[in-house]
Image (cartoon, rainbow, N blue to C red):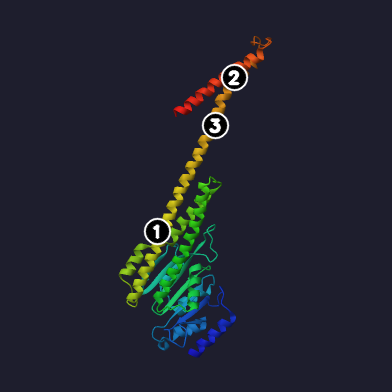
């Protein structure tokens, strides 16, 4: 068995690891053993080696468990998981369930987790997300996705670095913390963009900042709605965990959810800040519009006398006064200037009173 595992590891290492999957839909697999001085804790597995391990439970060492990650875009993955990994029926139902809310539930002594995560090429402009499904038992962790995700890739990199993971539940906790780290980076990037908008606002350069803030706020609301775990299911799990879950793992799961809550709280605070900035920008826009309307009103009032008099004198009817007078133009100009000065005086007096 050990020789077979080392042969499979060498074959996979030679072919290289990618986001593709083999014929069974397996993207990657790892066997976790209790760490010793002479071997690493995680051993890379192929689907054949994983199948051999699953079929021979009597050959498992104490504390061993495997993690198999599948690509659901490969139609063979669901069949392989059902036939060989013996996942719970609730896990198969979750794969086709319309609900995508993040949650961790207990079904048939198995932890079923539905985790929404951002895509591997995530950006704040697109905010694309996808779902990761997990089935966690004492000896087998099954994860499945349709598109590459950031948190699961960070978890794989941590395993490759040799991070000590002593149990299947700790692997789940590690994933939740990686997802929280991804959210922290998203919030940090969003804060940087909001700071830039605020600087432009203080400098008087509005441009399209209000539209940008609105789009960013919608993205944050969407991420918070999708990524926030359901508190009811998580509370029930933490109150009555499976018997095979160690007390230390339960505590770490509780701590990871608390860390997640802190990130979501920061995201909510950022949304409130964006809302205040939107209101400030709207107030400035309304003030500028009011100022422009006021200036337009003043110009209209000052131009009113000349428009009225020009309209009266421009009529093609008989009896137009001063038509034949030598100084008729200057007399009319004086009258217009007088009325304009009076109108301007009224406007200035009204402004001082306000």
Of 271 and 16, nearer the camera is 271
Q: Is residue 277 visible?
A: yes
- The answer to whether residue 168 is left or right of residue 290 is left
Inter-mark Cα distance, 1 to 2: 65 Å
The residue mark sitting in front, 1 or 2, is: 2
Give the Cα separation between the discs numbered 1 and 3: 45 Å
| Relative image position of residue 173 (x, y in whole percent) | 41, 71
Instruction: Read off the residue under disc 2.
Output: 337
The residue to which callout 1 is attached is 265
CA gap between label 3 and label 2 equals 20 Å
| Image quadrant containing the C terminus | top left
Tell me what residue is drawn at x 48 percent, y 60 percent.
188
Residues marked 1 and 3 touching at CB (< 8 Å):
no
Callout 1 crowding tier (Cα within 10 Å): few <14, some 14–19, many ≥20: few
Q: Is residue 229 visible?
A: no
Residue at 34 percent of width and 63 percent of height: 232
Q: Which residue is mark 3?
A: 295
The x, y position of residue 315, in whole percent, is 65, 16
């Amino acid at each position: 068995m050990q020789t077979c595992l080392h042969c499979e590891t060498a074959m996979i290492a030679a072919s290289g690891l990618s986001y593709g999957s083999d014929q069974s839909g397996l993207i990657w697999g790892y066997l976790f053993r209790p760490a010793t001085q002479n071997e690493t804790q995680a051993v890379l597995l192929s689907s054949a080696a994983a199948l051999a391990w699953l079929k021979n439970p009597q050959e498992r060492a104490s504390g061993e468990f495997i993690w198999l990650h599948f690509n659901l875009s490969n139609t063979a993955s669901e069949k392989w998981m059902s036939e060989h990994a013996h996942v719970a029926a609730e896990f198969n139902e979750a794969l086709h369930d319309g609900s995508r809310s993040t949650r961790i539930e207990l079904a048939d002594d198995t932890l079923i987790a539905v985790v929404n995560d951002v895509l591997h090429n995530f950006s704040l402009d697109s905010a694309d997300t996808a779902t990761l499904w997990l089935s966690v038992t004492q000896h087998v962790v099954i994860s499945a996705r349709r598109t590459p995700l950031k948190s699961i890739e960070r978890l794989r990199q941590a395993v490759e670095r040799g991070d000590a993971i002593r149990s299947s539940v700790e692997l789940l906790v590690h994933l939740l913390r990686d997802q929280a780290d991804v959210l922290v980076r998203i919030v940090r990037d969003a804060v940087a963009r909001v700071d830039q908008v605020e600087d432009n606002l203080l400098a008087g350069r509005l441009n399209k900042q209000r539209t940008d803030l609105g789009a960013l706020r919608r993205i944050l609301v969407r991420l918070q709605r999708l990524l926030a775990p359901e508190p009811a299911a998580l509370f029930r799990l933490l109150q009555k965990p499976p018997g095979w879950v160690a007390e230390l793992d339960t505590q770490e799961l509780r701590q990871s959810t608390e860390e997640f809550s802190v990130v979501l709280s920061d995201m909510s605070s950022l949304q409130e800040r964006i809302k205040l900035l939107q209101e400030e920008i709207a107030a400035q826009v309304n003030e500028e519009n009011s100022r422009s309307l006021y200036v337009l009103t003043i110009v209209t009032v000052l131009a009113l006398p000349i428009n009225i008099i020009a309209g009266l004198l421009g009529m093609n009817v008989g009896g137009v006064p001063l038509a034949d007078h030598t100084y008729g133009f200057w007399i009319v100009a004086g009258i217009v200037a007088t009325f304009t000065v009076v109108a301007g005086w009224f406007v200035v007096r009204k402004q001082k009173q306000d």
